[in-house]
Image: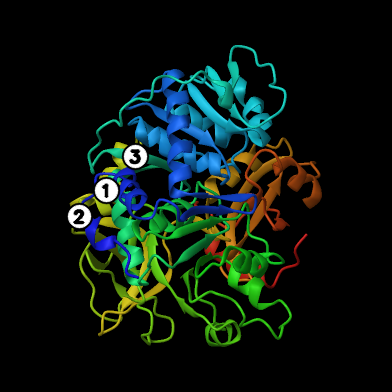
């Protein structure tokens, strides 16, 4: 049965889309988790009760409300409740630690933080550095911790206000803030509009012909585009079902797929490699999946499709610029191509002077949606960065690519000093700032090196203070708790000095070139 995406492109918010789904398929599963499931009707009651609690706690339209959830039903319900009140949902990366977490929370200037119980400890660790947080609303059972200067309350025990009317919102108003690492500096807060959430879901679902029979499986947390827009919102606009697992597990992957009845899943980083590397089984093809989409596409694509009896497609895009390139199911593309520009988008390849390049020439990938809401509204409180990245109405990605004569895009690499590891964009500078604070470290450079599982692994070259000593295990222990786990370097090299360019910048290309030939400590 066809989905409803054609009717929803102009919807003001995801809640308008949800209303339509509720009217048409109230008793259909909307969410499935390992712990249970919720129909559209049941979830409607859940998120409205959450909205009444938050209204009673004084959350108003326009407030920025950071939340610290992986992806249980309560996390999705809190997101929808915040949207109902006309507030802005700031979905925090639950891997953030230390200064990275404090900086992100201080940027929002929010006085209320909603935290799932398992993550309270890491918030309390940075509490002295938080300049605005005065209240923690904790979801989950257990004894609440004491915190100096901050009120700590059970979210479920908050007195509910009278159910407030849904706050009116515009398609071009900020709905959601997502933190992502750029090429330099601290993690940036990406502002996404209500129109972005709806439009991106409608566009991507249309590419792979999402429908009411589809169950969309995602093992990534709610601070990821893939879980929110790429799974939950896509399910709504197609009258389908979103199935969320707490994390990616190669040993449980097909068990989850079969238990949820998943027909579509998305992949990122090395997930397909991990799945493919498992021993073959006679029942590998005995699964309900028809399609999987994501990046990067592995070289064993054809074998994966044959073995598991499904189709793989890829594309190109980002949280900031939207998904602007996609392959169409059932079509053949040249090897290495990630598809052609998606409907509603324009794409160019530019040189360093912003001059358009011809087919075959490598330059920066820039994109522009015909609907301005289909890319970010900008980084929060970063006007100079926005002016540079969004100049001329185009999103300047910092990525390098080329087009062939037929308009197929080939991703070549990154201009940005960013490391891509297992679906995460990692700022090298953030890693360097943490490691340089170690008393034994004089200088450090972080960079990405090729991984056997696809994408990159994190490597660092470290110069020690004169007379100092430090082992790789000691350095990793130092990093643990001060940065997200996926940022902790896998490869550590201790050098007498870092290679430099004539302008005294670290020559990271030289470090990468030498990586395979020098012994790693």
Q: Residue furthest top?
A: 149
The answer to whether one can see residue 305 in this image is yes
Residue 320 versus residue 125 in the image, above or below: below
Dot 3: element = strand
| Residue 461 position within the rendered picture, expressed as x and y whole percent measured from the top left | 66, 55
Q: Which residue is identified by label 1?
A: 195
Q: Residue at x 74, y 41 (%)?
A: 478
Dot 2: element = loop
Nearer-N-terminus badge (2/3): 3
Q: In which quadrant of the rendered image does the N terminus lie?
A: bottom left
Of 386 and 212, nearer the camera is 212
How packed is label 2: few (under 14 Cα within 10 Å), some, or many (20 or more)?
Answer: few
Q: Which residue is identified by label 2?
A: 371
Q: Residue at x 78, y 59 (%)?
A: 521
| Relative to 63, 123 lies left or right | right
Residue 205 versus residue 393 in the image, above or below: below
Q: Which residue is identified by label 3?
A: 175
| Relative to 395, 393 lies left or right | left
Residue 481 versus residue 164 in the image, above or below: below
Q: Label 1 near label 3: C-beta < 8 Å? A: no
Q: Label 3 near label 2: C-beta < 8 Å? A: no
- Quadrant of residue 212 within the rendered picture: bottom left
| Relative to 424, 355 lies left or right | left
Q: Residue at x 31, y 38 (%)?
A: 174
Q: Label 2 near label 1: C-beta < 8 Å? A: yes
How packed is label 3: few (under 14 Cα within 10 Å), some, or many (20 or more)?
Answer: many
**Label 2, label 3: how many angstroms apart (C-alpha)?**
16 Å
Nearer-N-terminus badge (3/1): 3
| Relative to 197, 133 lies left or right | right
**Label 3, label 1: how many angstroms apart (C-alpha)?**
9 Å
């Amino acid at each position: 049965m066809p989905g409803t995406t054609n009717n929803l492109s102009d919807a003001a918010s995801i809640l308008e889309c949800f209303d339509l789904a509720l009217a048409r398929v109230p008793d259909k599963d909307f969410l499935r988790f390992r712990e249970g499931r919720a129909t559209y009707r049941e979830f409607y009651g859940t998120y409205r009760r959450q909205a009444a609690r938050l209204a009673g706690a004084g959350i108003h339209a326009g407030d920025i409300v950071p939340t610290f959830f992986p992806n249980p039903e309560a996390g999705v319900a809190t997101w929808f409740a915040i949207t109902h009140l006309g507030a802005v949902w700031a979905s925090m990366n639950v891997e953030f630690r230390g200064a990275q977490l404090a900086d992100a929370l201080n940027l929002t200037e929010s006085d209320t933080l909603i935290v799932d119980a398992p993550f309270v400890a890491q918030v309390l660790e940075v509490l002295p550095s938080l300049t605005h947080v005065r209240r923690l609303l904790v979801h989950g059972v257990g004894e609440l911790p004491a915190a100096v200067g901050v009120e700590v309350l059970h979210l479920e025990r908050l007195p509910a206000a009278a159910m407030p009317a849904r706050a009116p919102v515009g398609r071009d108003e900020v709905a959601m803030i997502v933190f992502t690492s750029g090429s330099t500096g601290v993690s940036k807060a990406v502002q996404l509009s209500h129109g972005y959430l709806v439009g991106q879901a409608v566009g991507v679902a249309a590419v792979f012909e999402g429908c009411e029979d589809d169950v969309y499986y995602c093992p990534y947390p709610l601070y990821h585009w893939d879980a929110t827009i790429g799974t939950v919102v896509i399910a709504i606009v197609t009258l389908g079902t979103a199935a969320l697992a707490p994390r990616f597990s190669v040993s449980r992957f097909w068990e989850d797929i079969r238990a949820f009845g998943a027909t579509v899943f998305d992949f990122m980083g090395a997930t397909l490699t991990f799945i493919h590397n498992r021993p073959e089984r006679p029942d590998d093809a005995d699964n309900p999946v028809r399609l999987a989409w994501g990046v990067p596409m592995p070289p064993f694509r054809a074998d994966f499709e044959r073995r598991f009896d499904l189709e793989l497609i890829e594309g190109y895009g980002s949280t900031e610029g939207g998904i602007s390139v996609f392959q169409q199911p059932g079509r053949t593309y040249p090897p290495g191509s990630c598809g052609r520009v998606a409907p509603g988008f324009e794409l160019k390849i530019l040189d360093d002077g912003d001059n358009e390049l011809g087919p075959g020439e490598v330059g920066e990938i820039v994109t522009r949606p015909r609907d301005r809401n289909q890319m970010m509204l900008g980084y929060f409180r970063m006007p100079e960065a926005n002016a540079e990245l969004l100049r001329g109405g185009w999103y300047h990605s910092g990525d390098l690519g080329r087009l062939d004569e037929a308009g197929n895009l080939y991703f070549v690499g990154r201009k940005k000093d960013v490391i891509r590891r297992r679906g995460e964009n990692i700022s090298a500078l953030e890693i360097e700032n943490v490691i340089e604070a170690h008393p034994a470290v004089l200088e450090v450079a972080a960079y990405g090196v090729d991984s056997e599982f696809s994408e990159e692994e994190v490597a660092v070259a470290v110069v020690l203070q004169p007379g100092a000593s430090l082992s790789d295990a000691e350095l990793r222990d130092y990093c643990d708790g001060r940065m997200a786990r996926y940022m902790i370097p896998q490869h550590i090299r201790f050098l007498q000095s870092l290679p430099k360019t004539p302008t005294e910048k670290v020559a990271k290309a030289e470090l990468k070139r030498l990586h395979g030939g020098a012994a790693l400590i």
